[in-house]
Amino acid sequence: MADWTRAQSSGAVEDILDRENKRMADSLASKVTRLKSDSDFTSVTGLLTGSVKRFSTMARSGRDNRKLLCGMAVVLIVAFFILSYLLSRTRT
């Protein structure tokens, strides 16, 4: 009878450990997903930073590029809003 009780309590401990292990694995998976989305956002930020640097260089180059400069400003603003909208849709 004592062996059966020990085996039963041993099985209960294994079940508890298994449930805890699954809970921790799910928590880790959600953290990994969050880190991947942060990484995507960082790459978009780097792309926008490079565009802003090119835009600033073009602005300093002279007044001949005024139409091109305005066009680039509009494209960058529209691209920013599109990217922010897409990122907000993927997080919800």
Image: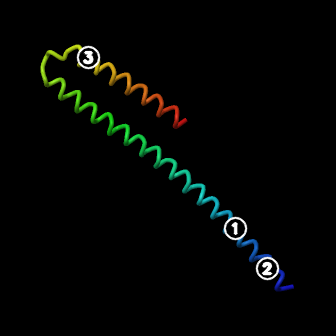
Mark closest to the chain's N terminus, 2 or 3: 2
Give the spatial CA distance, label 2 vs label 3: 77 Å
Quarter containing the N terminus = bottom right
Report the residue at 28% width, 31% height from top: 51
Q: Which residue lies furthest to the bottom in this view?
A: 2
Q: For mark 3, give the secondary structure.
A: helix
Q: Is residue 15 left or right of residue 67?
A: right
Residue 86, compared with residue 35, is above or below; it is above
Give the spatial CA distance, label 2 vs label 1: 14 Å
Give the spatial CA distance, label 3 vs label 1: 64 Å
Q: Label 1 belongs to which residue? A: 16
Residue type at mark 1? Answer: Ile
Residue 24, compared with residue 1, is above or below; it is above
Q: Label 3 belongs to which residue? A: 70
How are the colours assigned in the image?
A: rainbow
Report the residue at 56% width, 54% height from top: 29
Q: For mark 2, give the secondary structure.
A: helix
Which class describes the residues within 10 Å of circle 1: few (<14), some (14-19), or many (20+)? few
Quarter of the rendering containing residue 52: top left
Which class describes the residues within 10 Å of circle 2: few (<14), some (14-19), or many (20+)? few
Quarter of the rendering containing residue 20: bottom right
- Residue 54 location in percent, x, y? 23, 30
Q: Do the residues labelled 2 and 1 touch (CB within 8 Å)?
A: no
- The tag on residue 7 is 2
- Residue 53 location in percent, x, y? 22, 33
